[in-house]
Amino acid sequence: MLQKLKNLSHLLPMSVTFKHLFKPPITLQYPEQRQQLKQRYRCLQRLDVKKCISCGNCARACPNGAIKMKVVGIEEKKVKDKVVKKEKKHPEIYLGRCMFCGLCVDACPVKALTWRNDVLELAEYTREELFYPWWKLAGYEVEPAKEGGSGQ
Ligand code: SF4
Ligand code: SF4
């Protein structure tokens, strides 16, 4: 009797398999089919250059030193009847060091740095390709010309 029960013991795990035979699959045929990524998914930062005020908070907040500020031009600002020249800087990110903690995004006071949720593949063949200059973060194909002189 005991031996008979032992022989039937494989039926229980098989029943789990059979239960799933008649359910729709939960897997996708990637890469042809792609999952709709969640709103809060963190994959790559997006920079809104119109909002960025060059404060550098994002670079200071990064615990891994993955962000460097790049001077992209000189802008003139009026401060108490005087016109002062100020360096315009934008963040650049080395994704090889990024751990996607989100501290840079949280530290941005004007929400110029946000998360994208539309990129799944970030792997590259070389380390250099993991470097995202400010213009790439901002969605430009090539680096735009500098405004107001070199300022480098
Ligand atoms: S997500 Fe974190 S590790 Fe990545 S750049 Fe921002 S602060 Fe640095
Ligand atoms: S992205 Fe935000 S935190 Fe970073 S320099 Fe620009 S305004 Fe400051």
Image (cartoon, helix red, strand yellow):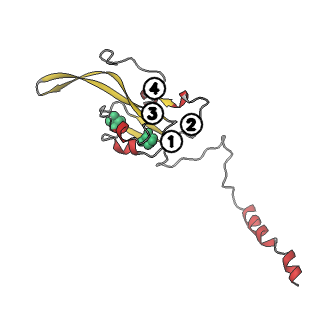
Image quarter in which the N terminus is found: bottom right
The tag on residue 122 is 2
Could you tell whether 125 is left or right of 146 in the image? right
Residue carrying label 1: 43
Residue carrying label 4: 140
Foreground label between 4 and 1:
1
Could you tell whether 102 is left or right of 109 in the image? right
Q: Earlier in the sequence, mark 4 or mark 1?
A: 1
Q: Secondary structure at mark 1?
A: loop
Q: Are marks 2 and 1 in contact (CB under 8 Å)?
A: yes
Query: Is 25 rendered above or below residue 46?
Result: below
Question: Would the CB of label 2 be found within 8 Å of ligand 1?
Answer: no
C-alpha separation, residue under disc 2 versus residue under disc 4: 17 Å
- Kind of residue at disc 2: Leu
- Kind of residue at disc 1: Cys
Residue carrying label 3: 93
C-alpha separation, residue under disc 2 versus residue under disc 3: 13 Å
Residue positioned most to the front: 64
